[in-house]
Structures are given as structure tokens and as C-alpha cells.
Image: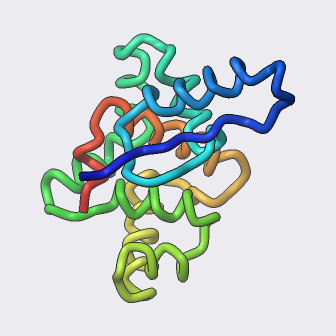
């Protein structure tokens, strides 16, 4: 059907057990994605997965609660849009392309995200904070990221 492969960091042969451990951790940190990736892609998920589930839920709720509620109430995809935007380097064009929506649609969703959060998600350390919250969603509520 499908397979997942996570490649650990490059190391000398005598240190291969460390890279295999990092790759294995990457595969178990959250839901598996079919295809190949590197340990860097899942490093935030790996660290977050070591925290108690209740703590992760708190991060998700306090950070993304308004977006989650809006999506549930209106059948929209704001959490998915935010996740895509963050993973595409805050590029609206790349986000729209990845989500297969018009650029204007992506802009409108991001504007709604900003209104619901009450701050600009692109300023300062906000993208890092939101990336952590999205990683929490991948671990606790992966269904919220399906479109």
C-alpha cells in the first residue's frame, strides 16, 4: 500500500546507532506520512511527543482554540491552512499551490486566522509558537489537519 521512511542525520559509521535511533523516533513521533523524509522534519514532533498528553492539549487549545472552533462550526480548514503556510515558509503562493486553492482564497483564510487569533501570525516568534501548536495538533488531533 504505502510506506514511510525517515532518514536520520548523517554520521560516521561508528555512530550509526544514533542516526537509526533519531530516524526511528521520527517515525513514532506522530502519524506516519507515506513517503520519505528526514529526521529534521519531525524533530519538533519528537520533542513534543515526550511531553504529557494533557500538556500538549493545553498548548493546542490555548494557541489554536479559536481556529479549531471556527473550523468545527463553519466546516472550514483554517488549521490546515495555517499548517501549510508555516510549512511553506510563510509563502501564500506556495500555500495556495499546495492546498490547490486560489491565492486569494489563501489570503482570505490567513486574514481570518489573524482576526481570530487577535495578532499577526507572521510577526516575531509567532511562527515558531504556532509551529509548535500545529505539531501538537499532528500528535493529538491529526484529523484537524485533513482537508
- State the quadrant of the C terminus: bottom left
Q: Which colour scheme is used?
A: rainbow
Q: In the picture shown, does residue 45 fall above or below 93?
A: above
Q: In the picture shown, does residue 103 fall above or below 116?
A: below
Q: In the figure, residue 108 lies in which quadrant?
A: bottom left
Identity of the residue drawn at 28% across and 62% down = 77
Q: In the figure, residue 53 lies in which quadrant?
A: top left
Spot occupied by residue 107 in the image (x, y as percentages of width and height)? 45, 79
Side (left or right) of 12 relative to 66: right
Spot occupied by residue 47 in the image (x, y as percentages of width and height)? 58, 23
Identity of the residue drawn at 37% across and 40% down = 32
Side (left or right) of 12 relative to 70: right
Q: Which of 67 and 139 is in front in this view?
A: 139
Count of numbered tags = 0
Q: Which of 78 and 44 is in front in this view?
A: 44
Spot occupied by residue 49 in the image (x, y as percentages of width and height)? 47, 21
Q: In the picture shown, does residue 53 fall above or below 22?
A: above
Spot occupied by residue 3 in the image (x, y as percentages of width and height)? 36, 47
Q: Which residue lies furthest to the front in this view?
A: 13
Q: In the picture shown, does residue 26 fall above or below 65?
A: above
Identity of the residue drawn at 22% across and 56% down = 71
Side (left or right) of 43 relative to 140: right
Identity of the residue drawn at 49% across and 14% down = 51
Q: Nearer the viewer, residue 85 or 104?
A: 85
Q: Which residue lies furthest to the top in this view?
A: 52
Q: In the figure, residue 59 lies in which quadrant?
A: top left
Amino acid at each position: 500500500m504505502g510506506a514511510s521512511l525517515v532518514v536520520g542525520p548523517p554520521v560516521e559509521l561508528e555512530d550509526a546507532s544514533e542516526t537509526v535511533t533519531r530516524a526511528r523516533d521520527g517515525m513514532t513521533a506522530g502519524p506516519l506520512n507515506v513517503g520519505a523524509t528526514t529526521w529534521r522534519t519531525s524533530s519538533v514532533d519528537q520533542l513534543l511527543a515526550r511531553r504529557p498528553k494533557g500538556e500538549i492539549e493545553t498548548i493546542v487549545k490555548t494557541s489554536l482554540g479559536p481556529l479549531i472552533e471556527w473550523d468545527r462550526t463553519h466546516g472550514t480548514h483554517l488549521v490546515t491552512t495555517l499548517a501549510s503556510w508555516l510549512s511553506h515558509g510563510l509563502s501564500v503562493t506556495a500555500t495556495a499551490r499546495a492546498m490547490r486553492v486560489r491565492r486569494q482564497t489563501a489570503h482570505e483564510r490567513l486574514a481570518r486566522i489573524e482576526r481570530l487569533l487577535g495578532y499577526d501570525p507572521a510577526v516575531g516568534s509567532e511562527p515558531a509558537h504556532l509551529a509548535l501548536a500545529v505539531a501538537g495538533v499532528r500528535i493529538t488531533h491529526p484529523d484537524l489537519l485533513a482537508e
